[in-house]
């Protein structure tokens, strides 16, 4: 008899634990990570242009010209987004990197102020319940177990409370999702990150269409430069700060993923389609990321280094690149490319007019 009653109480406790497990699983769903907003666009013709530029710059043997044209890259003192080793700072190594975008600030706040406290409180609550059951209802202390199988009040509570918790989490969670899906404004600067096996190429579509090929530095070069090995690259992705960037990703061979934790940015780079998300960096600095989709043998050796600079510095850097021009110059070029047709037409008309005059003169002379 006693053992059957004990099973009933055990079922009750098990039921409660199942509910809590469901709640914990639901948290995982509520906190859906950054998602790729995908647009099915066919690969634009600019790639051909870019590979030409690439071939050119490789032929020059002087790929990205550090310090060329008076432009100086940031030194290691400007490193802001990078992982922390446990040995250096155990607490910092356990949590997210400092955030340098407004989405990142929001996500970090949601984690620190909502998710983590809720998780901690629920975990402690379940632990306390377990300890309480183990201590109070052990066989020695409680030889005749209770026959309780239902308790309406407690069942209502353990249904309603998790629902309230989920609703509280859903509000900031959906807000964060919506923020990440926001389309870039029309005047955003377009930069396309191409994932190759195994390096990145950054195409500056609004600045002349050149492509910067970025490879990982080997250990001695990285340490000489004062940068972390396996994150430092030879040619950085230079971007303007405080300006919305229309960051597109594309996989040139297999699926890669462009991920920079301190900028709250992760977007898959898929062959045959362009993914796009807006990125606005708040502070000048150097931010490290990595390919975040297993893409082959050297997947672990295709880091990302973003150097965020003032718009003036960015424009200066752009002009040190083969075929690089500021957006104003690029727009002026476009306008000029459209204009000559009109000029030629006018010139042809003038020529025709002159010929007519000459003919008239000739016939007059003949008379
Ligand atoms: Cu990759």
Image (spheres, rainbow, N blue to C red):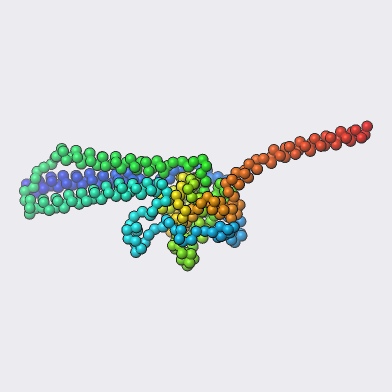
Residue 183's x, y, as percent? 46, 41
Instruction: Identify the residue at image location x=77%, y=37%.
Output: 350
Position of 59 with respect to 270 (left or right) is: right
Residue 269's x, y, as percent? 47, 49
Is residue 241 among the parts visible in the rendering?
Answer: yes
Name of the residue lying farthest toward the right: 367
Residue 324's x, y, as percent? 59, 51
Residue 166 quadrant: top left
Position of 136 with respect to 54 (left or right) is: left
Position of 326 with respect to 300 (left or right) is: right
Is residue 306 among the parts visible in the rendering?
Answer: no
Between residues 304 and 13, which one lies in front from this camera angle? 304
144 shown above or below 346: below
Position of 14 with respect to 303 (left or right) is: left
Between residues 2 and 61, which one lies in front from this camera angle? 61
How many numbered tags mark residues here? 0
Residue 252's x, y, as percent? 51, 51
Instruction: Identify the residue at image location x=55%, y=47%.
Output: 205
Instruction: Identify the residue at image location x=37%, y=46%.
Output: 106
Instruction: Identify the residue at image location x=33%, y=40%.
Output: 171
């Amino acid at each position: 008899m006693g053992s059957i009653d004990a099973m009933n109480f055990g079922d009750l406790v098990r039921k409660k634990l199942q509910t809590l497990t469901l709640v914990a699983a639901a948290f995982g769903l509520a906190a859906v990570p950054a998602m790729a907003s995908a647009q099915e666009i066919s690969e634009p013709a600019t790639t051909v242009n870019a590979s030409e530029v690439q071939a050119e710059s490789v032929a020059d043997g002087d790929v990205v010209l550090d310090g060329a044209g008076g432009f100086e890259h940031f030194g290691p003192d400007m490193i802001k987004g990078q992982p922390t080793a446990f040995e250096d700072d155990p607490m910092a190594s356990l949590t997210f990197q400092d955030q340098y975008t407004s989405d990142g600030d929001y996500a970090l706040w949601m984690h620190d102020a909502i998710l983590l406290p809720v998780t901690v409180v629920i975990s402690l609550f379940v632990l306390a319940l377990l300890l309480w059951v183990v201590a109070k209802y052990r066989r020695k202390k409680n030889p005749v177990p209770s026959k309780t199988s239902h308790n309406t009040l407690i069942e209502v509570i353990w249904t309603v409370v998790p629902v309230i918790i989920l609703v509280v989490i859903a509000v900031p969670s959906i807000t964060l999702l919506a923020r990440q899906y926001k389309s870039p404004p029309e005047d955003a600067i377009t930069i396309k990150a191409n994932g190759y096996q195994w390096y990145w190429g950054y195409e500056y579509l609004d600045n002349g269409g050149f492509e910067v090929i970025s490879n990982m530095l080997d250990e001695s070069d990285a340490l000489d430069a004062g940068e972390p090995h396996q994150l430092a690259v030879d040619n950085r992705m230079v971007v303007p700060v405080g300006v919305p960037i229309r960051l597109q990703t594309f996989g040139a061979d297999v699926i890669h993923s462009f991920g920079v934790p301190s900028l709250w940015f992760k977007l898959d780079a898929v062959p045959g389609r362009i993914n796009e998300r807006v990125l606005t960096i708040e502070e000048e600095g150097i931010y490290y990321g990595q390919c975040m989709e297993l893409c082959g043998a050297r997947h672990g050796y295709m880091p990302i280094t973003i150097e965020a600079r003032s718009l003036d510095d960015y424009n200066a850097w752009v002009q040190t690149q083969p075929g690089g021009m500021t957006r104003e110059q690029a727009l002026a070029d476009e306008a000029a490319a459209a204009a000559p047709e009109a000029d030629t037409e006018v010139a042809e008309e003038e020529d025709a007019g002159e010929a007519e005059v000459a003919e008239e003169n000739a016939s007059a002379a003949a008379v």
